[in-house]
Amino acid sequence: MAFFSRLDLQEGLQTLSVLQWIPVYVFLGAIPILLIPYFLLFSKFWSLAVLSLAWLAYDWNTHSQGGRRSAWVRNWTLWTYFRNYFPVKLVKTHDLSPKHNYIIANHPHGVLSFGVFINFATEATGIARIFPSITPFVGTLEGIFWIPIVREYVMSMGVCPVSRSALKYLLTQKGSGNAVVIVVGGAAEALLCQPGASTLLLKQRQGFVKLALKTGAYLVPSYSFGENEVFNQVTFPEGTWLRLLQKAFQDTFKKIVGLNFCTFHGRGLTHGSWGFLPFNRPITTVVGEPLPIPRIKRPDQKTVDKYHALYINALRKLFDQHKVEYGLPETQELTII
């Protein structure tokens, strides 16, 4: 009985570690968004709101210049439970020399990119041990850094804006041994994720290649096997009123918020139930061989196309070499659109 109790406790802690992720961001975001205007207009604590906004203005450029990472936050035990929930694993195929900087391009986006978060924004899978002397930075939407408190939290994990200026700073102004991690397909690719699918939004995505050429950063392909398996996404049949309603809502949401809204579900608090927790399915992020890139101040389109094609070939090779080992059939092909 004690053995099963320990198992139940471990599973409960793992579930709570995942449950906290979204509510914490919502709660931390809601506090300044709601309280700062209230304090300014209706409270005697207006000075706190003024100080908060003054600090935000004073510290405005920090998130675009490497941020303030915290080894303590990245090593929280919480992330270990988060890792074990799926579980998540990081696999190295080649060393990354600290003499260079890198753009680690990751695929697929999935619904919430759990693999990228756990492997690169925390030390739960031991990235500092696996890639010694390499400092990872995970790129995300810049709007997150406009929110007091939230920006401090995400900066502490080594998260940075995915803006051109922030990434260029990390790759050219902070010495060597830096690796920026970009989920190339972005939120638009989340609409393509389905269990069993391997479809990437990559054919027209060349910005990361241009950035590599302008900075001389090596390109590193990586693929998170299992990322598409942790949620079921519902796409209603074309021509039905449900599909029309779904598309209208997604288009409106994208115009207002700038994000693509996925209609998805996972498991509930108990196995076999319906809910919004991800399924307990393994996610393995395989990091491939770095592709050397020359530094060219103004690369022409022909050069960009050349290295974009080389990158796609390297990604296909990585996918084909590891797909069977991590749960996909031998016949599975990587579809790039």
Image (cartoon, grey):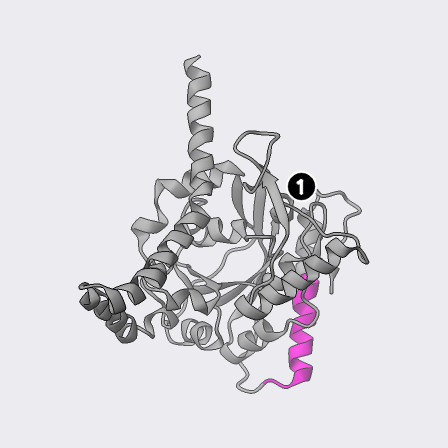
Answer yes or no: is residue 300 visible: yes
Q: Depth check: give the residue in front, 235 or 43.
A: 43
Specify the principal SS of the magenta part: helix
Furthest-front residue in this view? 42
Q: Quadrant of residue 244?
A: bottom right
Mark 1 falls on what kind of element?
loop
Q: Position of residue 133 (x, y in %)?
A: 39, 58
Q: Depth check: give the residue in front, 290 or 211.
A: 211
Q: Quadrant of residue 137?
A: bottom left
Q: Position of residue 149 (x, y in %)?
A: 32, 60
Furthest-top residue in this view? 1
- For residue 309: magenta? yes
Q: Quadrant of the N terminus?
A: top left
Residue 80 drawn above or below residue 109: above
- In the image, 130: left or right of 202? left
Q: Depth check: give the residue in front, 242 or 290.
A: 242
| Boundaries of the magenta span | 299-314
Residue 149 drawn above or below residue 161: above
Q: Position of residue 261 (x, y in %)?
A: 60, 58
- For residue 178: magenta? no
Answer yes or no: is residue 129 visible: no
- In the image, 250: left or right of 277? right
Q: Quadrant of the C terminus?
A: bottom right
At x 58% / y 70%, what residue is drawn? 255
How many other residues sit within 10 Å of disc 1, few (<14), some (14-19) or many (≥20)?
A: few
Q: Quadrant of residue 56?
A: bottom left
User: Circle 1 sits on which residue?
Assistant: 325
At x 64% / y 51%, what residue is drawn? 263
Q: Amino acid at mark 1?
A: Glu
At x 40% / y 48%, what residue is drawn? 123
